Amino acid sequence: MNNCGNVGGRKAGHDDSRSGKGRNICAGGGGGYSLGPMAQGKPRILTGDTPTGRLHLGHYVGSVENRLSLQQDYECYFIIANKHAFTTRAQNPDDIRQSVMEIATDYLACGIDPQVSHMFIQSEVPAIDELTFFFSMLLPFNRVMRNPTLKDEIRDKGLGDEYPFGFPLYAVGQTADILAFRPEMVPVGEDQLPHLEMTREVARRFNQLYCGVDPHTEDRDYVKAGGLFPVIEPKLGRVRRLVGIGGPGPDGQLLKMSKSLNNAIFLSDDAATVQKKVMGMYTDPRRIRATDPGTVENNPLWIFHETFNPNQPWVQEMEQAYRQGKVGDVAIKKELVKVLNDLLEPIRQRRRQFEQDPQLVLEALRQGTTAANVLAEQTLALAKQAMKQEYFGRELRLR
Ligand code: ATP
Ligand code: MG
């Protein structure tokens, strides 16, 4: 058996992640590895966002809440997947750059602590691309094209058959975004599950092919059995898929809230914008007057109250009244405006601080990207060793 995960006689398990120090990232040379200080010995998390806009309420309940509650107990890596933004916006590099900064600012405003967690820029971590190429050999082409999230995105974003080759490639790239960090857990929204399933397939396949792991091994035992990559577990948020404020899509289903679908309430929206969006949001289209009985199911107004209103007994009482035509949309919308603004106000206040000092945001990204490179370079070296393609080792340095 050709066990993977040993570098210079040390086992690369979950307890040996390293934080980057300063700007030097040494991950090779002389046959050994310059490994920096031991990290806190915590299990790892990898998750992130595509910089196609700012963070919205869907991100908050789908993923950010989990990140905040887990950042003390896990070593967290948050990827800002700027290359993936090029799949649909290659002609708008300025927008992508701006979104990178917006998303990093949103993370900090939400309470992600850059002293504890590593937020980083995907395109500055070259090991991810190198792993993408190798991993793309482990996934049949038709398997990638059958990925239901890709199909949904092609439909919902109106990509037709005009999308670039890089569009399906991003799903393969995402397996590398994740596995480069050998995380234990990946907090995501429901739409990401097909991507995570592909990631699990890549991990099994790599471990079987190059680390000699028995295909009958239980998923949770792959690393113990000598595999390099854990067969990762998704962690869904409190809400798996928050709908947007607009009406249903072509198939009659309410669309998920998405940066790209123009149906989002952003964490950075000011109070007046939140009010405008909520007052104009889609509700029960058959209800003309406040005295008409209304439908609560599949109605974003009530989905939002159920998700965000801390006073759930009030929500239940009012849902009953709504069903009976005893309360109007306007009153319920006004209450939602209040609930959302209460949630968002502290985030807005923190955001203002960081907006005034973009250098602070950039420095947090630099630190996070440095740490991300240390770990990703180590993973790449181990993967190359397993594939018998480790020849010289190398050093990588951010300026
Ligand atoms: P885009 O429209 O560019 O695809 P997006 O709004 O879908 O953007 P992503 O950056 O693709 O956002 O997703 C980042 C993370 O947030 C993923 O884990 C995703 O599952 C989660 N997420 C995004 N939208 C929602 C939502 N509406 N409900 C729950 N989770 C969500
Ligand atoms: Mg998305």
Image (spheres, rainbow, N blue to C red):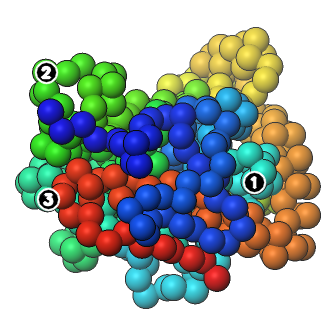
Label 1, residues with CA under 10 Å away: few <14, some 14-19, many ≥20: some
Residue 387 versus residue 392 in the image, above or below: above
Q: Is residue 140 left or right of residue 42?
A: left
Mark 1 lies on residue? 114
Find residue 76 and report its image quarter. top right
Of residue 74 and residue 298, the one placed in the foreground of this image is 74
Q: Secondary structure at mark 3?
A: loop
Give yes or no for contact between labels 1 and 2 (Cβ–Cβ under 8 Å): no
Find residue 67 and report its image quarter. top right
Mark 3 lies on residue? 137
Q: Amino acid at mark 2?
A: His
* Residue at (57, 68) in percent of width and height: 25
Give yes or no for contact between labels 3 and 1 (Cβ–Cβ under 8 Å): no
Mark 2 lies on residue? 216
- Placement of the C terminus among the 4 image quadrants: bottom right
- Placement of the N terminus among the 4 image quadrants: top left
Label 3, residues with CA under 10 Å away: few <14, some 14-19, many ≥20: few
Residue 148, horizontal then vertical, whole percent:
24, 46
Residue 165, horizontal then vertical, whole percent:
21, 74
Q: Amino acid at mark 1?
A: Pro
Of residue 318 and residue 363, the one placed in the foreground of this image is 363
* Residue at (49, 85) in percent of width and height: 92
Of residue 38 and residue 30, the one placed in the foreground of this image is 30
